[in-house]
Amino acid sequence: MPPSKLIAQIPRAINMPPLEGVGALATPGDQSGTLLETVVSNVIGILTVFGVIYFAFQIIFAGYGLMSADGDTQKISKHSQKITRGIIGLVVIVAAVFLTRLITSLLGIDNILNVNNWVTNTLTP
């Protein structure tokens, strides 16, 4: 009798094509880092712009409320606090952008969101 094959044999290596995503996420290979970089950079930029616009409107509307308070101390204190909070919000946004740029330049990182460059330099010998 010929020898029978074992059911649990170690299979040979199977050549599989690389997996790719669907649509805009179908970036194979080392391009996935640039997609992440672009998305995160755009989101941070949009949130920064919306934050500046929001706090600027808060200051403008609080100033208008302060002018129309007619000497009412409660309204004056309420709108003064809104102006103070709006200015603090603008300072926090500007300081965050400035400190991020300062720290990345001190560390020698040209672009903190360049994930593709980090992965390539870390994983490639």
Image (tube, grey):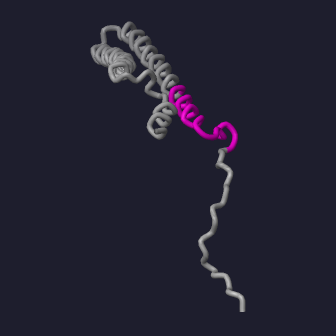
Residue closest to the eye, 94 or 105 = 105
Quarter of the N terminus within the rendering: bottom right
Magenta stretch: helix, strand or loop mostly: helix
Task: Please tell me whether residue 110 belongs to the stretch shown in magenta.
Answer: no
Point 54% across, 26% down: residue? 42
Q: Quadrant of residue 62?
A: top left
Task: Please tell me whether residue 34 belongs to the stretch shown in magenta.
Answer: yes
Residue closest to the eye, 50 or 68 = 50
Residue at the far bottom in the pictured view: 1
Query: Residue 5 at what x, y percent from top left?
Result: 67, 82
Query: Residue 16 at what x, y percent from top left?
Result: 67, 55
Point 44% across, 14% down: residue? 56
Residue closest to the eye, 48 or 1 = 1
Q: Is residue 13 left or right of residue 44?
A: right
Task: Report whether residue 86 is seen.
Answer: no
* 37 w.r.t. 56: above or below: below
Point 45% across, 23% down: residue? 111
Query: Residue 120 at what x, y percent from top left?
Result: 50, 35
* 44 w.r.t. 90: above or below: below
Question: What span is in magenta?
Answer: 22-42
* 71 w.r.t. 114: above or below: above
Query: Residue 80 at what x, y percent from top left?
Result: 31, 14
Point 37% across, 22% down: residue? 108
* 28 w.r.t. 94: above or below: below
Task: Report whether residue 120 is seen.
Answer: yes
Q: Is residue 117 left or right of residue 86?
A: right
